[in-house]
Image (cartoon, coloured by chain):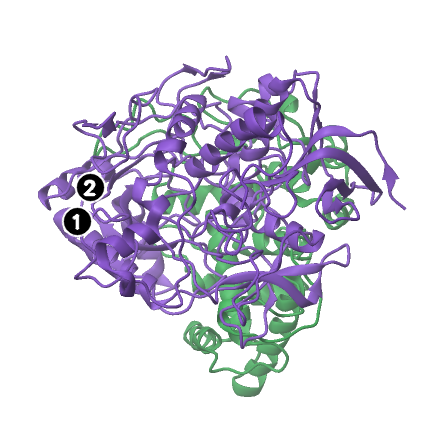
Chain colours: A green, B purple
Amino acid sequence: MSEKNLKAPEADAQAGSLDSDVHGPTGADECSSLTRRSLLKAALLFPAVGVLGCGAHESSHSATPGANAASVFFSTEERAFVEAATARLIPDEEDGLGAKGANVAVFIDQQLAGPYGRAERWYMHGPWAQGIPQQGYQLKLTPAELYRTAIRDVDAWCVQNHTGHFAALSGADQDAVLHGLESGDIKLADVPAKAFFTMLLKNTVEGFLADPMYGGNRNFAGWKLVGFPGPRYNYVAEIEQYGKPYTQPTVGILGRDGTLLRRG
Amino acid sequence: MATTLKPVDIVLVGFGWTGSILAEQLTRTGLSVLALERGKYRDTVPDFATTQIQDELRYAVRDGLFEEPARDTLTFRNTMDQTALPMRHLGSFLPGVGVGGAGVHWNGQLWRFLPEDFVIRSHTEQRYGKSFIPADMTIQDWGITYAELEPHYDTFDYLCGISGAAGNIQGVIQPGGNPFEGARQRGYPLPPLKRSYPTVLFDKAAKDAGFKPFPCPAANASAAYKNPLGVQMGPCTYCGYCEWFGCGNYSKASPQTTILPVLLKRENFSLRTQCDVTRINLDSTGKNATGVTYVDEQGRQFEQPAALVICCAFAQHNALLLLLSKIGQPYDPRTNTGVVGRNYAYQITSAVDVFLDEIMNPFMGAGALGQAIDEFNGDNFDHGPEGFVGGGYIALWTTGGRPILQHQLPEGTPKWGAGWKKAMAENYLKSASIATHGSVMSYRDSYLDLDPTYRDIYGDPLLRLTFDYHPNEIKMSGFLTDKATLIAQAMKPRSLHAKPRIGHYSIVPYQTTHNTGGCAMGADPKTSVVNKYLQSWDVPNVFVMGSSVFPQNAGYNPTGTVAALAYWAADAIKNLYLKNPGPLVQV
């Protein structure tokens, strides 16, 4: 997908291209001809964003955009855990969509399949030591590995201490488990619970509030909840209108809600 | 084996602000100047285009424009009895990588240091007595005065098209400006930026509390501006994506928007990107540099001969390069001897969040759009009763409202669940944050050296940072936080949340990219790496730029002083060194 394939959106929308180095080989024509499976394979091989752009386009056509998007990193069980956990961290309620409606699990899945999940930018050489909190993350695990290991451990803990896997527990029980992970009161077999919880919560907030082209924040759910109008470019006329609400519709980097539906 | 390349007259290691300034100044001599930059080429178009740059996840959260610890990092510990461990991902500070360096992703908060900051030890001893300075505090005078630097501050103000209100023009205090600033020869080139609502409320509250607020000096253009090099800048649109992003609008001053369009056309200038300088090479006497060794993106090693080597890398990387190249005696805190790595310092910050009844529209902002008071910076107040050295400014900045990282929540808000979500909905649009930005003094046990264990991709030791906040800084920051709280209360918020800096320094949460020291400048080779012209005492054809030469850190953002020192050094190289190469200061 490239910007020349997007019909011009309305004047104030910010449709645009992603830069060339993140497109990789998934160029404009290939995008539509790729099968879902090969697209997902591509997501593992190439920098994620270009592929996600395609995903965003595809999802805007479906009735429940992206909600059923197949996982590119998670197993079925892992996906169920993350769907359930993120739904407790940012619940769907009357006042707006939460993590589930915003497809936060899709976002995390795609992030873990990409450079972030592989800790590509991180210094990952030993020797490994626990250190003190001020020294920061010192686990040998990449984010993807931490999720995989921790989810297995949490589910095992839930089976042992509750009635089944995390996703099958009641909301109250899930909250109790999450609090136990957050405080470190729950000891996991292989990884520090607090480190996992910290990363899960951080990624959940990211998925709720990042640009929708990354798979979460569906229909700008997170931005609409807080009142962020998206990456608009010019507030010269409005910045001195003190105390007045900003009324222009929400935009994302790929345009407004539904912009992509107007493609060819 | 390294391939030896054709010699150049001057080689610059790093191509951010200081490299660009030095290159622009020194190419005027007609000499050949080569800049070696470890990162990629980047320019406003296409890299910072507004159709893609306003992406908080990619740039602010996933560090899109910053250095990658996989290639460049350091190890860290608070104290000498701990084992330093690698900074595995970025956190507390965010050095840039690529053309323009951190000058691409800074906010544009452009300050001058106070006249007293440059003579802090002698001034403090004179006003408060020698015993006022703690025994382990190794602060020292810079060997240069504000008056010597003023013309160079001015040059940079006009290069960048700074928006602001002068407070002191040639000794005459100006209404609406910072009355505490050192005398400037003329006003700012552009008027202040438009004010955001929170800065208006801060301004009124600060006045009500008896202070003299002023618009923060901003390298965000408030109007179209053509700088003295003939480079055109455009007016800021207040989009709120300055810090951690490149500006797509030619409004934020960066090497790309102020210098490079002119410099890159000069025949005697060349730039090679993705070239990692690993050593400054010395001849057999160890007193003369012959050039540098670098590795390109394909892993090929080159020797680049040069008559003059100038270190223009980010602060701590200059110290690392000197240590690896065995230039200057490494600092040893146990014996208190040596100089390279000595006097590392940083910044100490805190915040007071305010939660208001009205809509603040936090997403309308600019990186240096703020209102500040300077009553408690430097020695602008009597430190006697307070019992600490240093100070800082208190400002309300509205840099943007990027929702992942830029949201404030009232004290006691749950970290997740329905309570968190409700608080997000209620407070994102109706909050602001007052920042304190404090000095950090240098100490005997705050320093840089080579790590004994961890290695980089070339097999060289990582730099090791040993640093913690000392009681002097915690006390000073608490003092500033209390004053900020007074102003916050005068804003009549529905609630406020004071967040003082307490406990040990942690490399985890972002604080500032204001790392200083390691190559301190000064008048005495026993306590400094470079002389007042930023020239190595040991190898006179090596100069060192950047905040690495600060002997301690003042209460302001460093870029203004970094740039002024670069112009000052460029003048010395052009007018003194090149006419008679050798030490510019005799001991």
Q: Is residue B490 visible?
A: yes
- Image coordinates for residue B565, horizontal then vertical, percent: 47, 35
Mark 2 closeness class: few <14, some 14–19, many ≥20 residues within 10 Å: many
**Between B317 and B257, the one nearer to me in the picture:** B317
Q: Residue B438: image x %, image y %?
A: 33, 52
Left or right: A35, with B390 as reference point: right
Q: Amino acid at mark 2?
A: Phe
| Whole-number angstrom distance, CA of label 1 to CA of label 2 | 7 Å
- Residue A77 position in % (x across, y down): 64, 68
Residue extending farthest to the bottom is A160
From what the image shows, is residue A55 above or below residue B27?
below
Q: Please, what is the three-letter code of the amino acid marked with disc 1?
A: Ile
Q: Chain letter for mark 1, please.
A: B
Query: What residue lies at 33% left-to-right and 23% top-to-bottom?
Result: A236
Query: Is residue B499 visible in the rendered structure shown here?
Result: no
Q: Is residue B177 above or below residue B531?
A: above
Crowdedness of circle 1 by 10 Å Cα count: few (<14), some, many (20+)?
many
User: In what element is the residue under mark 2?
Assistant: helix
- Residue occupying image coordinates x 25% and y 45%: B430
Instruction: Kindly identify the residue that appears in the image at 67 percent across and 39 percent down.
Output: B39
Q: x and y percent of residue B267 in the render?
A: 70, 16
Q: Would you say the residues marked 1 and 2 are in contact, meaning their CB atoms lie under 8 Å apart? A: yes
What residue does disc 2 label?
B202
Residue at position x 37%, y 48% in the image: B554
Secondary structure beneath dot 1 equals helix
- Judged left or right of residue A161, residue B27 is right
Of B481 and B236, nearer the camera is: B481
- Quadrant in the rendering for residue B6: top right
Q: Which residue is mark 1?
A: B487
| In this view, B22 is above or below A55 | above
State the residue in front, B132 or B423.
B132
Lower sequence index among marks 1 and 2: 2
